[in-house]
């Protein structure tokens, strides 16, 4: 009987394997359940945080930076990229940084001009070869640079506008006397009106030269002039040139700014087809600064001399990048022009179009235009 019991209780290999398989499956199932439970726990734990971040970013427009949005972001505008991508056009690699600092910090105090106002044509239209002086006055009063607190100002502006005095039947001699009396009155009335280097004035007429004679305040002040001949003693490190307003220098319709093959000129002999086709020589022009500004604004590559005092923004812009720079020797001029290949000229012309904004007067003024570039020149001189 005992043997029989042993026979019945003898181990069955097949049954053992089946039981082991069942145990293993049950163990794996438990592991899967545990893993799923842990995953669910983690999800529910971080879900509120993710939701909070989502709402926070939406509220503060984080999607515009492209972190979460799948919508393609617009490319930076050409206006925004213009300065950054054109560093070679500027002498200083820190131009943009210095310019933005100037916009934030530069302050100008303007002296009252009641004594001069009676001699002004306040409604005079901003046109003519000296209208850039009028634009500067208007732009300055429209700008963010003004302060009413003298000691906060980096520079103090003496508001002499010979442009507005012209046309009222006043002789040049009398206008010069009026200006001198006005300046002397400022000196006696304001203790901070002294002949140091923190004053400047604009002059586009010989009246200013006459008036400055014998007045240390005007002689020592920074002169912003339409041409160096309008300064009593023009010093490039102290004084600066005011770019001319756009005039009409062409006897017929001016060439298109995008038409490279049909460059016109302003002042040169008619028989020089090579010059006439591509360039605008200004070396022989009586009104040198007007010729330069007109050439640039009409999209015609100017021929200039780096030795000239009348180049606007000479210590800011690299003129070799957008103009043909020569001496006053006509033979050398002829040789240089004919030596320019199409690729070189195309690059000069493309760069010229990029700097046009620096020679454009606007009202109200806009960033990087002629007014702001003059302000930048003054900022560098303080």
Image (tube, helix red, strand yellow):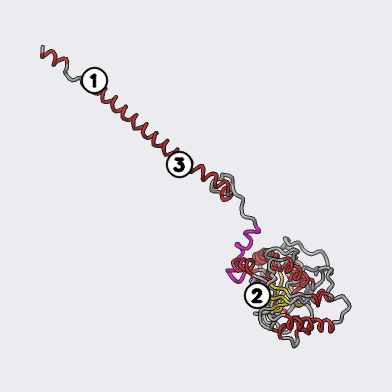
Q: Which element carries disc 2, helix, strand or loop? A: helix
**Disc 2 crowd, CA 10 A, few/some/many (<14, 14-19, 20+):** few
Report the quarter where the C terminus lies.
Answer: bottom right
**Would residue 28 appear left or right of 234 to someone viewing this image?**
left
- Discs 2/3, front: 2
**Disc 3 crowd, CA 10 A, few/some/many (<14, 14-19, 20+):** few
Q: CA distance from mark 1 to mark 2?
A: 103 Å
Q: Which mark is residue 79?
A: none
**Would residue 362 appear left or right of 105 to someone viewing this image?**
right
Q: Which residues are magenta?
A: 78-95
- Discs 1/3, front: 3
In the rendering, at what x and y percent does residue 318 appear? 63, 71
- Tell me where residue 254 sits by quadrant: bottom right
Q: Look at the image and say whether residue 79 sits in the magenta stretch.
A: yes
Q: Is residue 293 placed above or below 199 in the rendered structure?
A: above
**Disc 1 crowd, CA 10 A, few/some/many (<14, 14-19, 20+):** few
Q: Which mark is residue 46?
A: 3
The residue identified by callout 1 is 15
Q: Earlier in the sequence, mark 1 or mark 3?
A: 1
- Discs 1/2, front: 2
In the rendering, at what x and y percent does residue 227 appear? 74, 78
The residue identified by callout 2 is 151
Q: Nearer the viewer, residue 214 or 330?
A: 214
Q: CA distance from mark 1 to mark 3?
A: 47 Å
Inspect this view and state whether residue 285 appears: no
């Amino acid at each position: 009987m005992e043997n029989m019991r042993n026979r019945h209780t003898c181990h069955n290999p097949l049954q053992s394997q089946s039981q082991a398989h069942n145990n293993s499956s049950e163990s794996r199932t438990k592991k899967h359940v545990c893993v799923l439970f842990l995953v669910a726990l983690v999800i529910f734990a971080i879900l509120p945080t993710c939701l909070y971040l989502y709402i926070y970013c939406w509220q503060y427009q984080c999607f515009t930076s492209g972190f979460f949005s799948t919508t393609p972001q617009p490319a930076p505008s050409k206006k925004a990229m213009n300065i950054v991508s054109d560093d070679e056009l500027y002498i200083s690699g820190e131009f943009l940084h210095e310019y933005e600092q100037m916009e934030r910090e530069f302050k100008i105090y303007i002296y009252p001009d009641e004594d001069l106002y009676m001699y002004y044509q306040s409604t005079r239209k901003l046109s003519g070869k000296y209208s850039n002086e009028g634009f500067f006055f208007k732009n300055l009063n429209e700008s963010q640079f003004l302060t009413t607190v003298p000691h906060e100002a980096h520079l103090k502006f003496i508001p002499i506008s010979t442009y507005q005095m012209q046309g009222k039947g006043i002789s040049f001699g009398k206008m010069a006397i009026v200006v001198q009396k006005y300046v002397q009155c400022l000196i006696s009335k304001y203790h901070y009106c002294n002949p140091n280097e923190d004053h400047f004035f604009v002059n586009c007429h010989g009246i200013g030269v006459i008036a400055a004679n014998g007045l240390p305040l005007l002689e020592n002040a920074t002169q912003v002039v339409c041409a160096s001949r309008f300064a009593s003693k023009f010093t490039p490190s102290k004084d600066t040139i005011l770019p001319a307003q756009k005039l009409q220098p062409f006897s017929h319709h001016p060439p298109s700014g995008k038409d490279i093959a049909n460059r016109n000129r302003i002042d040169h002999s008619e028989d020089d087809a090579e010059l006439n086709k591509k360039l605008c020589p200004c070396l022989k022009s009586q009104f040198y600064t007007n010729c330069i500004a007109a050439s640039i604004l009409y999209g015609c590559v100017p021929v200039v001399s780096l030795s000239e005092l009348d180049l606007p923004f000479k210590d800011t812009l690299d003129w070799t990048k957008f103009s043909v720079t020569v001496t006053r020797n006509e033979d050398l001029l002829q040789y240089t022009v004919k030596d320019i290949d199409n690729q070189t000229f195309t690059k000069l012309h493309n760069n010229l179009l990029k700097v046009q904004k620096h020679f454009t007067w606007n009202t109200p003024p806009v960033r990087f235009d002629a007014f702001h570039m003059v302000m930048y020149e003054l900022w560098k001189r303080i």
